[in-house]
Amino acid sequence: MSARIAPSLLSADFAHLADEVAMCEAGGADMLHVDVMDGRFVPNLTFGAKVIETVRKLTSLPLDVHLMVVEPERYFDDFAAAGATGMTIHVEAAPHLHRQLARIRELGCRAGVALNPSTPLAHIRDVLPELDLVLVMSVNPGFGGQQFIPRALDRIREARTMLREARCDAALEVDGGVARRTIRSCWEAGADTFVAGNAIFSAADPRAEIGALRGECVVRA
């Protein structure tokens, strides 16, 4: 299996959103990553259902929606109706995690859970059967363009072991500081899906950068 690349629209030029989405498609992106921030769970404030709806009209690519919000269940119905393919919620903001993941799936979306850099992976062990995606944050969430936290590599290895032992085929995604210099070590640690924002949209040739990132990931035996 080749690596899956998910350009993060947080770093896109929203004055030319249609062009940016078309570029991602032409570059071979596997999905588009949409960061939703509420100014409470994280300091920043970003997109909502209207942006998801707009992007859905521009592409048939899967929309990987990352909810960095408190009370994420308040958004599920609207985001599913707007065209989200999958929704990932933070374990730190989801005290009723099992119920919330089940609701995402009831709405026909892929259910994912994200963990901040200091959150023990053991917190998701009991919900692995409900997961389609595990997101290991390799920066503290809230802003684009941050530096990759090296400790994330050990966490990726731990997550891969956990998934393997549970016979869970959920995708293992990494978000934060993903670039040519970091993606290969993440892939070798066991990740298979990569969110990249600044590395793609600030590249000299963003379209080619998607393929370059995937090219850093050699096929594991």
Image (cartoon, rainbow, N blue to C red):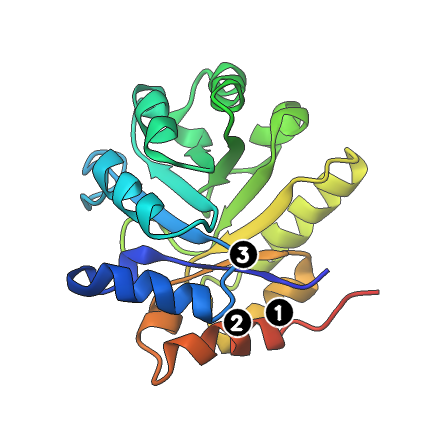
Label 1 amino acid? Ser
| Quarter-of-image position of residue 167 | top right
Q: In this orientation, which residue lies closer to the viewer: 134 or 18?
A: 18
Residue 29 relative to residue 122: left or right: left
Secondary structure beneath disc 1? helix
Label 3 amino acid? Ala
Residue 21 relative to residue 39: left or right: right
Residue 182's tag is 2
Residue 113 relative to residue 78: left or right: right
Tag in front: 2 or 3: 2
Secondary structure beneath disc 2? helix
Read off the residue under disc 1: 185
Residues at circles 2 and 3 in contact by the CB criterion of under 8 Å = no
Where is the C terminus found, in terms of image quarters? bottom right
Where is the N terminus found, in terms of image quarters? bottom right
Question: What is the distance, in whole Å, between disc 2 and disc 3 at their CAs?
Answer: 11 Å
